[in-house]
Amino acid sequence: MDGFHLANVELQRLGRAARKGAPDTFDSAGYVALLQRLRQQRLAEIVYAPEFRREIEDPVAGAIPVFPQTRLVITEGNYLLLDDSHWAGVAALLDDVWYVDVDASLRTGRLAQRHEQFGRSRQDAIDWVAATDEPNARLIAATQPKARLVFRWDDAARP
């Protein structure tokens, strides 16, 4: 799903760059169209999906080939169960949906660390998590009851 982030230049134009990662900062219609194409993929057709490249913080179109003999496609993303906009069409295109429940402190710590790894100062990373990532997390948490399975991620349980 991250390959469907709107490009930074488009986020700037729309005035949404400070909210990158929110539902309206993705091409949700394009994501739904990709899922539809995969559902209807012809025998000799390769369907290409975009990917998100952290080193440039932008999506790259056509970077992931999905060959017709592919038997399982796993997609992940925060907004698969939203009822808003084009997101509302996603769940019907999936055979199964799991919700990964992560402890809030583990999630926020990892998010801040990732933001630092890709160039933000410690304080800027913490501020971004609080102002942008956390409102998104609350929105996503409200979709949990729609998932068929809830998987509790607990780092302490791993060897």
Image (cartoon, rainbow, N blue to C red):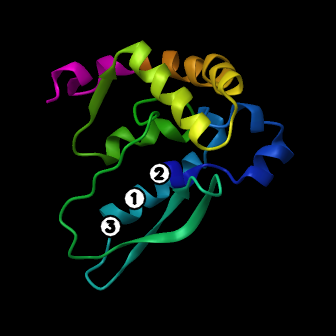
Residue 40: assigned label: 3
The number of discs equals 3
Q: Can residue 142 be seen in this view?
A: no
Report the Cα–Cα distance between label 2 and label 1: 6 Å
Q: Is mark 2 on a helix, strand or loop?
A: helix
Span shown in magenta: 142-159
Dot 1, how many residues are within 10 Å of its Cα: few (below 14), some (14-19), or many (20+)?
some
Q: Is mark 3 on a helix, strand or loop?
A: loop
Type of the residue with mark 2: Val
Query: Which residue is drawn at the image coordinates 64% and 52% (left, top)?
Result: 57
Q: Residue furthest bottom?
A: 44
Q: Where is residue 46 in the image (x, y as percent from the top left)?
A: 37, 79
41 relative position to 2: left or right: left
Q: What element carries label 1?
A: helix
Check disc 2 and report the residue beneath it. 32
Q: Do the residues labelled 3 and 1 touch (CB within 8 Å)?
A: yes
Dot 2, how many residues are within 10 Å of its Cα: few (below 14), some (14-19), or many (20+)?
many
Q: Position of residue 66 (x, y in %)?
A: 34, 71
Sequence-first tag of 3 and 2 = 2
